[in-house]
Image (spheres, rainbow, N blue to C red):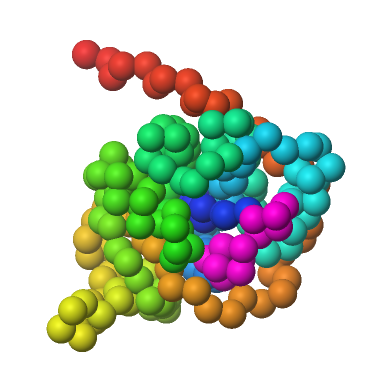
Amino acid sequence: MASIIAYTEILHAAMTAPSRFALAEARRVADDLGATVYALLALGPTIPDELAALAGEVGTAGADRILCCSDEALQGPPSDATHGPLLAAVAERLRPILVLFPEGEAGPKLGPPLAERMNAAFLPCSALEIQAATDLEPAQVIVRCQADDHGEERVVSLREIEKPAVATLRAGTAPLALGEPASEMEMLLYPPPTPPPPRE
């Protein structure tokens, strides 16, 4: 089954509004594509009660599964040096068709290097659209990219670029509840294990 990763920023032990919107959009896209939504949380040291509350909030916001890494190295501002290896390890494991970052601090810093590691397209986008399935074609994701300096907007079909996409998504208003509260989250190691070299 296809997977979508939504990078979820946490501030004062709660999801940020842009992260809630990105997760809601991941849920909407996944429902049409039959994909699984993974919320990825990269946190500083956190107590178990806070993690349990976060799991409920993130599950209700639309995640099917929650991946969390809690380590002192992750408590500062996001950077490729600290967060990049974790993102790369998760992407290598899940092989997502789409990784969504909320627009803001994390996306511009973490998105482009992750896209390079994944050999993916990096798309700062203003909206995600679904092209409905037909008798001949399955549903597909259309990414409406932000206007450039000349005011021109690009529209990109993920099927046409034939590779995964990493996108920063401009914030919008998210529904209050899209899923069920999650009872557990998978805790990831930091630093992530080094993958074995490819077989000759």
Residue 166 x/y as whole percent: 35, 55
For the residue pair 110 and 28, the one nearer the viewer reads as: 110
Instruction: From the viewer's perspective, tell me whether residue 200 is left or right of residue 57.
Output: left
Determine the image quadrant of residue 17: bottom right
Q: Who's the residue at 54% across and 31% down the image?
A: 73
For the residue pair 72 and 87, the one nearer the viewer reads as: 72
Residue 142 seen from this side: no
Q: Who's the residue at 41% across and 77% down the image?
A: 127
Instruction: From the viewer's perspective, tell me whether residue 155 is left or right of residue 69.
Output: left
Is residue 92 found inside the magenta-colored segment of the image?
no
Instruction: From the viewer's perspective, tell me whether residue 200 is left or right of residue 114.
Output: left
Q: In this view, which residue lies farthest toward the top?
A: 200
Residue 4 x/y as whole percent: 48, 54
Instruction: From the viewer's perspective, tell me whether residue 121 is left or right of residue 186.
Output: left
For the residue pair 24 and 72, the one nearer the viewer reads as: 72
User: Can you say whether 185 is above or below 55 in the image?
Assistant: above
Q: How many marks?
A: 0
Q: Give the range drawn in magenta.
A: 11-23
Q: In this view, which residue lies farthest toward the front?
A: 76
Determine the image quadrant of residue 49: top right
Q: Who's the residue at 78% across and 37% down the image?
A: 47
